């Protein structure tokens, strides 16, 4: 055959093949060239039948389709359609976008198409490409695999000592297991999209990772990612490999673990919580044998553990640990951790040098709050004595034992709302296994970052499953007693209810723990791409009311401190910081009349807070009107949103924003003496401590803890963050200007305060405040009327008898059963006459009468008139005999 003839026949054969292929369903036109991979993904394949395409082009004169494969030779044709009522309900944010129906003849190709390059296109009749966009696939993956995959057991699962390793990777072409230097093939279950390999007993303790060959939109091509296990139960240092770890192995159980006796459980409404960072707790404690480690909580004779036991004896019930799962911002090997090379203590208290030196090593030092998850279900290695191997598992368990033995239950701060990284970043785990699934994507296909990092999507079946499975593991295998959800409002309410249901199913007989005793609370803030239930019913303050899962109540917090956490002038005053009654010189506080009006409104917010934030509690406000808690305004939102005590968690400070002492340092007049600052600190804490419902305070706040005015100390190192249990070491105030990154705009206000030695409290103020706080906590724990269960009970037992047009600015008087509580935030002694108390035998509560504060012991009661007299800057509790 001549070359010319051969070329002619070949061309004819190719044309015939192309014509035949074009006649087959799902085949691309012969002349269609594959489009370059688009930068955006504006098409969303929400189920096997339906694609939603933002800004979809008019298909007139051409065709719309999904094109799959490296050459785009697999085609799923699209026809104009509409969303069903169920689809509109499930995807409310897509209801106004054009919808298209996948040709029924092509739907069977969906699973295959998803395992390759996928682009939505519009082509002209001649096959010329006119439009192209990437395709978001979480919805169709849930439709195809979600029901079956949600029942799969992932990660290492042991059966009589033999592990099976399983990973969900439905879009992967292949997955192989790299185990201790060798490669083991894995088998795909087409029904679930799960890849598995069954091993031998000698796999236990071996390092492993997965080699996942998958199309990655972030790379625009098919890649082979070497990835650790999202369901890992053990890790090598710095998360380099997962470890085949059996958490039921007796060798990983510390002595007494199987018979661990926990402190008596309390209802969430009675929880009194200390928020504590693992490293802060002990890194500066010279009496600790394990500074900065989990094992510091086993050092019973350390100053820190002695203090925690004292709080527990007074009525504190829980310690809330800031993130202690595997996070990515700290080198876990100690020889790789940097430290400031300056003599930080040598600089003046208002110097810029401390923060400058700390900032140089911040990215590589041993400190971070840890809100940057890498693996959700493995303890962080930097807190272990050895980050390699299983020490972190054993020592985390010993920490829980230590806290329980001190009379405290352990709460974990969990951050399922985002990950440290996404896409092809080496620290991205989830997104390199199933690209584009685990994170919440915006309409253009970019990852949402409203929570600061790559937002996850718990509304997707397998991300929601990961949350539930991870929490159950912490509860069962680590005996954690509660969970605090970071930015909980970015979770669906349904996801949190699924967590509650799964935990409630745990029983001592079956699982070794009582799941119903596990407390749940979180940040129910409403913002970002999910705000106002845009994508689902969120786990926000108003939506979680009545669920038994609490949300932080910022209403009373702002009223107590004054202003808000983002004020340009940090001197805006509030109830406990001298508004109207002890004004500073900031023009931001307004005129005297404006200050008085705002203070009285703040007092209404505090009253609502004292009821537990109840929406339907009725009282007389400071204007003399009869109102419900929900009718009191908080920046345009209802002050009261709780359905019952326990829905709202009261607090005056937490790790975010300035410590309470630092906030008061800004807000109180600079002339205020340390003793008076300490008294205002106790009074501010009392508004949460003596409220209905749960309350939280940052560890060390009872000791007047300062971070030298740092408002965001997540990466500020030990110098600004460490707790000082010994009053001789001070309270942390005056350790230099706070880091410039988040505080420089406040330096003009901070510098004169830090330079003033009169603002640094001594031992008398520090120990006195702590003892007075413990007295109030003891009263809260021993008086049952502080733990009422329903709105109706609170309505009957609690009142504000002097609330109204004539109430005293700076004073809140609360009647609760046989108690009367007077919060006097003014500098002067105040009298409060409750006329219907006249003739009744009230006296200062015995705890305060025999307590640590000599000033409160001068409070008195005149039986004949029903008059309570309380010293300035004092909270006094009276009881009827």
Image: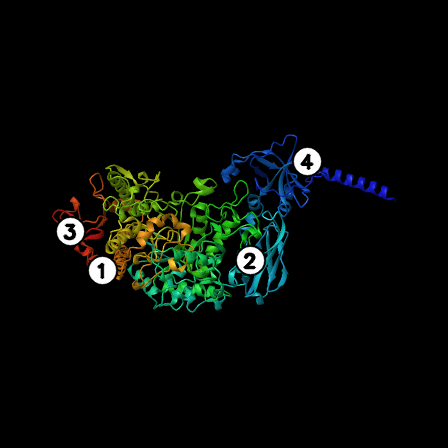
Quarter of the figure with the N terminus: top right
Question: Residue 334: horizontal and vertical position, in percent?
Answer: 47, 65
Q: Residues under labels 1 and 2: Cα distance?
A: 54 Å
Front position among marks 4 and 2: 4
Residue ranking furthest to the right: 1
Mark toward the start of the polypeptide (1 vs 2): 2
Q: Mark 3 = which residue?
A: 861
Can you say whether 261 is above or below 14 in the image? Answer: below
Task: Give the left or right position of residue 522, taking residue 794 as reference.
Answer: right
* Secondary structure beneath label 3: strand
CA gap between label 4 and label 2 equals 42 Å
| Labels 3, 2: front one | 2
Q: Earlier in the sequence, mark 3 or mark 2?
A: 2
Q: Residues within 10 Å of mark 4 (few under 14, many from 20)?
A: some
Mark 4 or 2, nearer chain start: 4
Image location of residue 82, percent across then percent down? 56, 34
| Marks 3 and 2 close (CB-CB < 8 Å) | no
Residue 449 visible to an observer of this rendering: yes
Secondary structure category for the residue under label 2: loop
In the picture, measured across the screen, residue 766 lies left or right of residue 93, that is left
The residue lying toward the viewer, choosing from 447 and 343, is 343
The quadrant holding residue 200 is bottom right
Left or right, 804 with respect to 644, comes to: left
The residue labelled by disc 1 is: 852
Q: How is the structure coloured here?
A: rainbow
Closer to viewer: mark 1 or mark 4? 4
Q: Position of residue 528 (x, y in %)?
A: 45, 43
Question: Residue beneath label 2, please?
Answer: 228
- Which label lies toward us, 4 or 3? 4
Q: Which residue is mark 4?
A: 128
Label 1 Cα neighbours within 10 Å, binned few <14 / some 14-19 / many ≥20: some
Q: In this image, 425 relative to 112: left or right?
A: left
């Amino acid at each position: 055959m001549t070359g010319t003839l051969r070329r002619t026949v070949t061309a004819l054969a190719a044309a015939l093949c192309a014509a035949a292929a074009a006649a087959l369903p799902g085949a691309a036109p012969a002349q269609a060239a594959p489009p370059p991979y688009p930068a955006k993904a504006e098409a969303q394949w929400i189920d096997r039948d339906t694609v939603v395409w933002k800004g979809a082009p008019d298909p007139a004169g051409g065709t719309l389709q999904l094109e799959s494969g490296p050459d785009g030779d697999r085609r799923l044709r699209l026809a104009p359609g509409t969303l069903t009522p169920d689809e509109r309900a499930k995807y409310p944010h897509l209801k106004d976008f054009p919808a298209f129906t996948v040709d029924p003849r092509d739907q069977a190709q969906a699973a295959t198409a998803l395992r390759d390059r996928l682009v939505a296109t519009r082509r002209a009749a001649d096959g010329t490409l006119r439009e192209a966009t990437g395709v978001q696939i979480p919805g169709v993956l849930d439709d195809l695999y979600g029901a079956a995959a949600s029942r799969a057991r992932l990660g290492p699962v042991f059966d009589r000592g033999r592990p099976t390793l399983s990973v969900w990777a439905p879009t992967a072409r292949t997955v192989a297991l790299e185990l201790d230097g060798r490669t083991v093939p894995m088998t795909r279950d087409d029904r679930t999209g799960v890849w598995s390999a069954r091993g031998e007993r000698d796999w236990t303790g071996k390092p492993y990772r997965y080699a996942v060959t998958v199309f990655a939109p972030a790379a625009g091509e098919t890649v082979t990612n070497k990835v650790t296990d999202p369901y890992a139960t053990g890790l090598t240092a710095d998360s380099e490999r997962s470890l085949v770890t059996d958490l039921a192995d007796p060798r990983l159980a510390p002595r007494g673990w199987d018979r661990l006796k926990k402190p008596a459980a309390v209802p969430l409404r009675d929880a009194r919580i200390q928020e504590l960072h693992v490293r802060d707790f002990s890194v500066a404690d010279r009496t600790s044998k394990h500074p900065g480690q989990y094992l510091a909580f086993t050092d019973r004779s350390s100053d820190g553990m002695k203090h925690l036991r004292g709080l527990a004896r007074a009525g504190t019930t829980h310690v809330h640990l800031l993130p202690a799962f595997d996070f990515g911002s700290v080198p876990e090997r100690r020889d790789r951790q940097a430290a400031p090379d300056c003599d930080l203590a040598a600089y003046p208290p208002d110097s810029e040098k401390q923060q400058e030196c700390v900032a140089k090593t911040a990215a590589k030092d041993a400190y971070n709050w840890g809100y940057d998850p890498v693996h959700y279900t493995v303890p962080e290695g930097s807190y272990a004595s050895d980050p390699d191997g299983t020490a972190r598992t054993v020592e985390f368990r010993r920490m829980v034992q230590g806290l329980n033995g001190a009379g405290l239950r352990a709460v974990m701060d969990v951050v399922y709302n985002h990950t440290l990284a996404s896409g092809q970043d080496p620290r991205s785990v989830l997104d390199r296994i199933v690209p584009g699934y685990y994170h919440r994507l915006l309409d253009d296909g970019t990852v949402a970052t409203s929570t600061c990092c790559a937002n996850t999507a718990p509304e997707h079946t397998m991300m929601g499953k990961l949350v539930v499975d991870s929490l159950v593991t912490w509860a069962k295998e680590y005996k954690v007693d509660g969970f605090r959800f970071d930015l909980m409002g970015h979770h669906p309410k349904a996801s949190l209810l699924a967590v509650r249901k799964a935990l409630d199913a745990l029983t001592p007989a079956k699982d070794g723990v009582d799941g119903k005793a596990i407390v749940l609370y979180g940040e129910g803030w409403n913002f970002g791409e999910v705000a106002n239930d845009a994508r689902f019913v969120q786990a926000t303050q108003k939506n979680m009311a009545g669920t038994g899962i609490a949300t932080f109540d910022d209403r009373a917090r702002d009223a107590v401190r004054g202003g808000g956490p983002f004020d340009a002038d940090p001197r805006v005053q509030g109830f406990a910081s001298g508004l109207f009654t002890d004004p500073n010189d900031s023009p931001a506080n307004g005129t005297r009349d404006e200050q008085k009006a705002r203070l009285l409104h703040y007092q209404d917010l505090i009253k609502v807070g004292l009821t537990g934030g109840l929406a339907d509690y009725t009282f007389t406000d400071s204007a003399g009107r009869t109102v419900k808690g929900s009718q009191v305004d908080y920046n345009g939102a209802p002050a009261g949103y709780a359905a019952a005590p326990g829905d709202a968690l009261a607090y005056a400070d937490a790790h975010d924003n300035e410590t309470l002492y630092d906030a008061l340092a800004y807000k109180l007049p600079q002339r205020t003496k340390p003793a008076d600052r300490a008294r205002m600190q106790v009074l501010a804490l009392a508004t949460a401590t003596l409220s209905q419902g749960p309350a939280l305070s940052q560890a060390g706040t009872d000791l007047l803890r300062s971070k030298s005015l740092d408002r965001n100390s997540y990466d500020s190192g030990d110098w600004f963050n460490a707790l000082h249990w010994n009053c001789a070491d001070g309270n942390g105030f005056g350790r230099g200007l706070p880091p410039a990154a988040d505080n420089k705009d406040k330096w003009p206000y901070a510098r004169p305060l830090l330079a003033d030695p009169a603002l640094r409290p001594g031992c008398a103020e520090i120990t006195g405040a702590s003892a007075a706080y413990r007295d109030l906590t003891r009263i809260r724990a021993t008086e049952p009327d502080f733990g009422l269960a329903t709105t109706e009970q609170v309505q009957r037992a609690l009142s504000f008898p002097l609330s109204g047009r004539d109430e005293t600015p700076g004073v809140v008087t609360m009647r609760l059963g046989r108690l009367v509580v007077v919060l006097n935030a003014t500098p002067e002694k105040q009298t409060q006459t409750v006329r219907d108390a006249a003739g009744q035998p009230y006296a200062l509560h015995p705890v305060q009468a025999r307590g640590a504060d000599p000033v409160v012991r001068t409070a008195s009661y005149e039986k004949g008139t029903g008059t309570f007299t309380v010293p300035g800057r004092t909270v006094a509790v009276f009881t009827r005999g």
